[in-house]
């Protein structure tokens, strides 16, 4: 390269890193930055365990191990500093862009390499996930490394190409399919040694993980035991969307419980304990059994997944970049996106590269194999992220090759490529109906942020986000747990009247759990509305007779209504529900005394003193009741 080209390369790489660095700084005070959620929280916990407790672990991997181990080593060396962890990831992401540039420069030409680098440097999803506490940027890096080795002219290039896919398999298990597809493609071309080298390089990176799994668990697990559960999550009777719909036995949104719940249900159905490999096989077979018995549904759902994969909409998962833009001016910049213009340009590039398919064929195979590997599971935006480097190659080629053909005054091919681009631009950006792509608003993001604020003891913000979610989706208000959570946030935020409304709705919607009825009863109690307080508190203990907190105020409310016998009955039941609560015994003794039930007063006072020997009120009742009983 010329000196000018080197300066241009350095400038673009510096701009790419600066964009990511500014993104990190802009999100530094945003939610989730220091306390990741869902998968990010799981990686953070696992990294902390690796750094501080057990490096090797004691069971076969359930989730892909490379990212938590990399993060764990970072924690061990530098401590848990998520700001610097994100900055290091930004640097690694920038290094990946250099590998992409270098591979294209060596195998295609310099202008195409610069076009790819410029688009990659300012691609919004790449920048966002380069700085998130998620594994996905390493999947991108694996494919960028593949492009780099593809561009080399070395005897060991295919071995390194396979190693990149092998390491990628430890980030996303479906990248193993790309190694097999690449080897098959090379074998089809009778490039036997490169095909073998790809397989050998992949296995060399995967084998240590397989050996580790066998050593710690005595079980053969190639990389992880998550294939079967993931396949079943995408293919079970309740999932007709193609998106993430957890089975009913799974605690949704809680990554730390996923393996536990899948294991518990599999062992319940199998009637025995299962090893990790057996757990994987069990759910894989369950998914295949469902697909075989419902082929029509499977085809329809797969069609939905294909539409989502090829659409501009970024199906949100743990984090939604569009929603997070409210906290970051960087994310509000007009950057390159999948719909504008990576996918349409890539479609034109695939068309233009057809005449050079001997050179581009393996990249097209990788792209097709990767998209194919997602079709049988479920779709999130970050799941298609590793395909972006391959799209960048073809998108950049469309720009430079089209310009080159126009300079040569060859208008027919560029005109057709422009038509391909235009058609793809329209099709990719057609809004998907909600039944396919889900709702395009931020109802789920508001709800998740509300939960985050609630856990962070920020009730006013939590209430605001829950209310925003309910405005977008009024059906939330039909869910007892949502009304309960919203009421709790409103109460803690100093808005008791509105909290009361939502507690009441929760109590009416959920006729089983006692908490909402108790909360409503206590609000009435605080307002000295004794009759509705007694009704709601009585409802709470009717739902769950062991719910001890309700008995004391229930007795007091009944007493204020003049029903001393009913109040005493509540205290008796409360004493049975809370055998260690001396206050209920003392109140029972006082009320029994007022009714002239001296034997009951005596016994209740004794029980109160057994729990609290120095209680003077109980001792006074004990002495008086003792005299009265002796005089009878």
Image: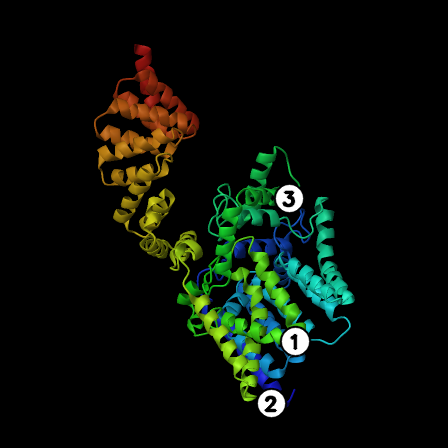
Question: For the residue carrying disc 2, how many other residues have a C-alpha within 10 Å: few (<14), some (14-19), or many (20+)?
Answer: few
Among the two numbered marks 1 and 2 on one chain, the one whose residue lies closer to the N terminus: 2
Residue with the mark numbered 1: 103
Front of the two marks 3 and 2: 3
**Dot 2 corresponds to which residue?**
4
Q: Nearer the viewer, residue 95 or 26?
A: 95
Picture quadrant of residue 358: bottom right
Q: Is residue 469 depicted above or below 391 in this figure? A: above
What's the distance in space between the residues labelled 3 and 2, CA to CA? 56 Å
SS for dot 3? helix
Which numbered tag is attached to residue 281?
A: 3
Q: Label 1: state its secondary structure.
A: helix
Choose the circle earlier in sequence order: 3 or 2.
2
Q: How many marks?
A: 3
The secondary structure type at the circle numbered 2 is: helix
Lower position in the chain sequence, tag 3 or tag 1: 1
Q: Mark 1 or mark 2, which is nearer to you?
A: 1
Asked whether disc 3 touches disc 2, contact meaning CB atoms under 8 Å apart, the reply is no
What coloring was used for the rendering? rainbow
Place of residue 287 in the rendered image (x, y in percent of width and height, measured from the top left): 57, 45
Query: Residue sitting at 50 percent across and 63 percent down?
Result: 310
> Could you say where residue 85 lies in the image, as x and y percent from the top left?
57, 65
């Amino acid at each position: 390269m010329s000196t000018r080209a080197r300066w241009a390369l350095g400038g673009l790489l510096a701009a790419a890193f600066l964009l990511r660095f500014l993104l990190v700084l802009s999100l530094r005070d945003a939610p989730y930055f220091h306390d990741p959620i869902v998968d990010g929280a799981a990686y953070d916990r696992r990294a902390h365990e690796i750094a501080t407790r057990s490096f090797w672990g004691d069971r076969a991997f359930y989730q892909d191990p490379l990212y938590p181990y990399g993060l764990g080593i970072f924690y061990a060396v530098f401590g848990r500093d998520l700001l610097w962890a994100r900055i290091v990831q930004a640097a690694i992401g920038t290094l990946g862009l250099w590998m992409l540039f270098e591979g294209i420069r060596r195998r295609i030409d310099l202008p195409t390499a610069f076009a790819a680098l410029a688009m990659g440097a300012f691609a919004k999803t790449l920048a966002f996930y380069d700085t998130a506490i998620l594994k996905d940027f390493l999947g991108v890096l694996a494919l960028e490394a593949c492009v780099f080795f593809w561009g080399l002219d070395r005897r060991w290039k295919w071995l390194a190409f396979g190693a990149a896919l092998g390491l990628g398999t430890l980030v996303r298990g479906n990248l193993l399919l790309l190694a097999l597809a690449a080897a098959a493609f090379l074998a089809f071309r009778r490039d036997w040694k490169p095909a073998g080298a790809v397989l050998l390089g992949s296995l060399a990176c995967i084998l240590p993980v397989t050996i580790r799994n066998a050593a710690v668990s005595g079980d053969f697990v190639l990389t992880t035991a998550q294939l079967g559960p993931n396949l079943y999550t995408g293919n079970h009777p309740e999932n007709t969307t193609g998106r993430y719909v957890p089975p009913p036995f799974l605690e949704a949104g809680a990554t730390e419980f996923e393996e536990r719940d899948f294991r518990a249900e599999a062992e319940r159905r199998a009637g025995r304990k299962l090893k990790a490999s057996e757990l994987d096989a069990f759910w894989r077979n369950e998914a295949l059994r469902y697909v075989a018995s419902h082929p029509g549904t499977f085809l329809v759902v797969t069609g939905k997944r294909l539409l989502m994969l090829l659409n501009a909409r970024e199906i949100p998962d743990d984090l939604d970049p569009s929603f997070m833009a409210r906290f970051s001016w960087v994310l509000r910049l007009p950057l390159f996106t999948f719909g504008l213009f990576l996918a349409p340009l890539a479609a034109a590039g695939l068309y233009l590269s057809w005449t050079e398919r001997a050179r581009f064929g393996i990249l097209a195979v990788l792209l097709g194999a990767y998209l194919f590997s997602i079709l049988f599971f479920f779709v999130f935006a970050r799941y298609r992220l590793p395909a972006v480097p391959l799209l960048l190659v073809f998108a950049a080629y469309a720009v430079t090759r089209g310009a080159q053909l126009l300079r040569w005054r060859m208008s027919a091919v560029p005109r057709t490529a422009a038509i391909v681009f235009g058609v793809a631009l329209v099709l990719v950006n057609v809004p998907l109906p909600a039944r396919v792509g889900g709702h395009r608003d931020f109802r789920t993001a508001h709800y998740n942020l509300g939960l985050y604020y609630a856990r962070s003891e920020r009730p006013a913000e939590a209430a605001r986000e829950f209310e925003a979610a309910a405005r977008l989706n009024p059906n939330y208000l039909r869910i007892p747990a949502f009304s309960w959570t919203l009421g709790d946030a409103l109460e803690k935020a100093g808005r008791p009247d509105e909290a009361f409304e939502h507690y009441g709705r929760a109590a009416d919607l959920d006729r089983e759990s006692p908490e909402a009825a108790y909360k409503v009863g206590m609000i009435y109690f605080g307002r000295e509305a004794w009759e509705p307080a007694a009704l709601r508190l009585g409802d709470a203990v009717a739902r769950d007779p062991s719910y001890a907190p309700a008995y004391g105020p229930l007795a007091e409310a009944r007493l204020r209504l003049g029903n001393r016998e009913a109040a005493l009955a509540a205290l008796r039941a409360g004493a049975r529900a809370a055998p260690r609560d001396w206050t209920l015994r003392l109140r029972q003794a006082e009320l029994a005394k007022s009714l002239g039930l001296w034997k009951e007063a005596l016994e209740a006072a004794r029980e109160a003193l057994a729990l609290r020997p120095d209680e003077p009120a109980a001792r006074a009742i004990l002495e008086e009741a003792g005299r009265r009983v002796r005089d009878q």
